[in-house]
Every structure is written in structure tokens, then in C-alpha cells.
Image (tube, rainbow, N blue to C red):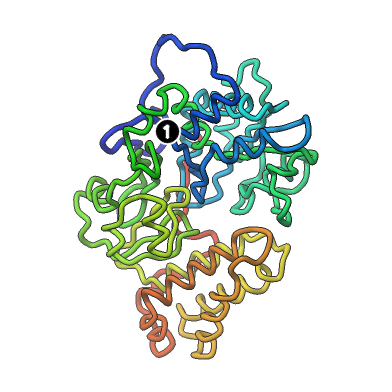
Amino acid sequence: MSFPLPVRPLRDARLLAPEPDGAPRGPDPSGPEIIEIAEAAGVRGRGGAGFPLAKKLRSVASAAGSTRFVIANGEEGEPASVKDRFLLRERPELVLRGLALAARAVGADRSYAYVSDPAAARRLAGARGGDLVDVVRVTPGYVAGEETAVVRAVGGGPALPTAKPPRPWQAGLGGAPTLVSNAETLAQLALAVRLGPETYRRLGTPESGGTFLVTLSGAGQAPVLYEVPYGVPLRELVTTHRGTAAGVTGMLAGGFAGGLLPPSALDLPLTHAALAAAGSTLGCGAFVLLAGECPVGVAADVAAFFDRENARQCGPCVTGTAGVADVLAGLTVRSATWSDVARLERWGQALAGRGNCATPDAVTVLVGSLFLHHRDLVGAHVDAECERCAVSPVTADTKFRISLEEP
């Protein structure tokens, strides 16, 4: 395997298993049958909120108008995630197969693959054959993968989110109903059709069938991409990765959008419901393990990244995110005051649900998790210099980014 990071299964593998060599494949199911399979298999989105794929397919298929489009979203804006780049580089046929099935399901006129990774773009271009798939390259960016930004960029505009509604399924590319689906989600659709709903559901939980990809990094270990069934305890994954869960003092969960979680989160099962109940999200399946880093410094690093990467189209991003980043950075060098801390907590509550992109929501989760789990530590940064923060300066490019060398 040429992927520059280790890639391993936990318990069982589907996305990581090689494609059946020469296995006969029956005729493709019809559009309605594909939607029924996605629903029976319980395929959920792997890009963020875990929305049921069948509902998105049905919404686009039943929308008004005769023209429809589908877009495979491979723009991996989360700095701590590599799963989509792996699939697009190493399993492009599986993603394209899922894209073709989604196009048939909704009756799409044309399909697009939307990526920023040059290696992924080359692999897709070589694998697409005669399929009606256009590969669209975009400059990487945190908000470039938001679904309205995807539609805007494929249509020739900037990769920046637009106001909602309408959502792309209502009026997307050229005003036509458009399905925007994450690359891993489409790969999972291809697996569900190939395996059948019953076999697909043998792994996972009743609410979330199958497996998903987890990018695990931090705590002094090299990053690794794992495939795990839904419901596996996080502690089991961490122990497999490090040999022990001892020394893990917290984590960034679900990518940067899930905020900070304490070490007790190791006992959570890896499901959307469990992470949501903990005030976080499974998100893109990226977890950054912490082993002694100062949570205030970690939050400052993430907030600085959000401030650099936000769309800068709305007040909540331009001023709110910047204000949060400034106060958190000030705490790391003992220049913030108690008044700043009070403003930080107010901002953390007031930014949710505002702006075109989801960055203010992510900032809200980040600040909320910091006060929920580390309130006393925030105050301690006002009263005294933090030695841990002093040796780890804040950087807008984030120290938690996973880089992949160009193959």
C-alpha cells in the first residue's frame, strides 16, 4: 500500500479490504432500489453530522425539475483527518462506483468529484474511464468542503459558503437539485449495494450500521488511519494504537468541530449518539489524543486556525471568531484579564447558529468544552503564567495538522 501513513483495521475491514478479484457482479439496481438499499443498510454520512444517506437521495430524486447533479465531496478541510485522501488515492474505484450509484438513484445528468489533493485528483482522473465524471480541483481550505461552498466552486465561483436556505438538494448547481456527498459516504454506498443490507449491518450498531474510518493522532504516536465498526469503545481503539490508554489526558474529538473532551471520554462507544450526548460530535472521525498538553493552549491553537480559515463573509466570523482567538491567545501569555474571560464565555454562547459556514458553531463547541471541563484552568491562566503554554506557542496553521508527503 503506497499511502504514506499506516492504515489498519480494528476487528474487521471492508473499506481497507481489497476489491474481490473477478467476482461476478449482478446487474445494477434501479434508482429506487438503490435508495431502498441505502435505507435498509442504514448508511449514514461520514463527513460530519451522520445524516442518513437515503433521506438525501430521496430528497434530490423527488425534487422539482428535470435536471439533477451529484458531487463527491473529497475536500478534507479538517487538519487532523486523512480518510478521504486515502480513499481517493487508494480506492478511487470504490468512490466512483458509489458516485455512479448515487447518480442513478437521483436521476442525475452529470457527476463531479471535488478535491484539493493533487494525488487524489490524478488517481480519480485515471480511474474514471468513460464515466461522465468531471474532476474539479480546488484550493484547500477549512470551509471549502461545506456543501454550499462545494456547489459554488463547482459552478465556477469561490469555494465559500452561501446563505441557507436553499440547500443544495433544493437548488444547487445551476439552480438544479444537487446531491453533495462525502467521499467515504459514497464508498459506503458502494459497499452496501455489493454486500446487501443484511451483511452490511452485521457490523456496527442498530442505529449506525457498518464500519467507518478513524484518523488517530497525537500523544506522541505517529498518525494512523483505522477502520472500525460503529460502537467500538474509544478506549479499545486507543489501547490498540498505543498499547495503553494510560497517559491520555484528553482529546480533540471528531476533528476540530467536536471541541475538547476529558480522559473519561475514553469510555465512550464510537457512535454519533454517544459523542453528541457528551457535547461533542463523531464528525469526520478524527481524534487528536492529548498527553499533557495544556487544554487552554490547545483551544488557543484551534481557535487561531478557525480565525485564519473562516469565510470572512459574516460578522460572527470576522469579529466573533477573531475575538475568541485573541482572548485565548492572550491567556497563553498571561495578557488576558478576568473581563476578557467573561467576554470569552459570552462569545462562546452567542456565536452558535450564526453565519453562512459552520465555523462559529465549531468555535462555540470549543469554548463551551473548555469552560465545561477546564474552568479552573482558564482562571489560573489569568493569575499566573502557564509553563506548558510558554513552550508551545500558538500557531494559526495549527500544530495538530497531519501532512501527507506528495507521492
Label 1 sits on a secondary structure element that is loop
Question: Going 47% across and 53% down the picture, which residue do you hit?
Answer: 401
Residue pointed to by mark 1: 3
Q: How many dots with numbers?
A: 1
Q: How dense is the environment of label 1, judged by Cα within 10 Å: few (below 14), some, or many (20 and up)?
A: some
Residue 160 position, x and y percent, is 70, 52
- Image quarter in which the N terminus is found: top left
Question: Between 46 and 157, which is closer to the camera in this rendering?
Answer: 46
Res 113 → quadrant: top right
Residue 127 position, x and y percent, is 57, 21
Question: Between 357 and 330, which is closer to the camera in this rendering?
Answer: 357
Q: Is residue 126 visible?
A: no
Q: Is residue 114 left or right of residue 290?
A: right
Residue 79 position, x and y percent, is 50, 52
Question: Going 53% across and 69% down the picture, which residue do you hit?
Answer: 364
Residue 242 position, x and y percent, is 24, 50
For badge 1, the amino acid type reads Phe
Q: Is residue 224 visible?
A: yes
Is 292 rendered above or below residue 222? Answer: below
Is 130 rendered above or below residue 48? Answer: above
Q: Is residue 230 left or right of residue 318?
A: left
Question: Going 51% across and 80% down the picture, which residue do you hit?
Answer: 345
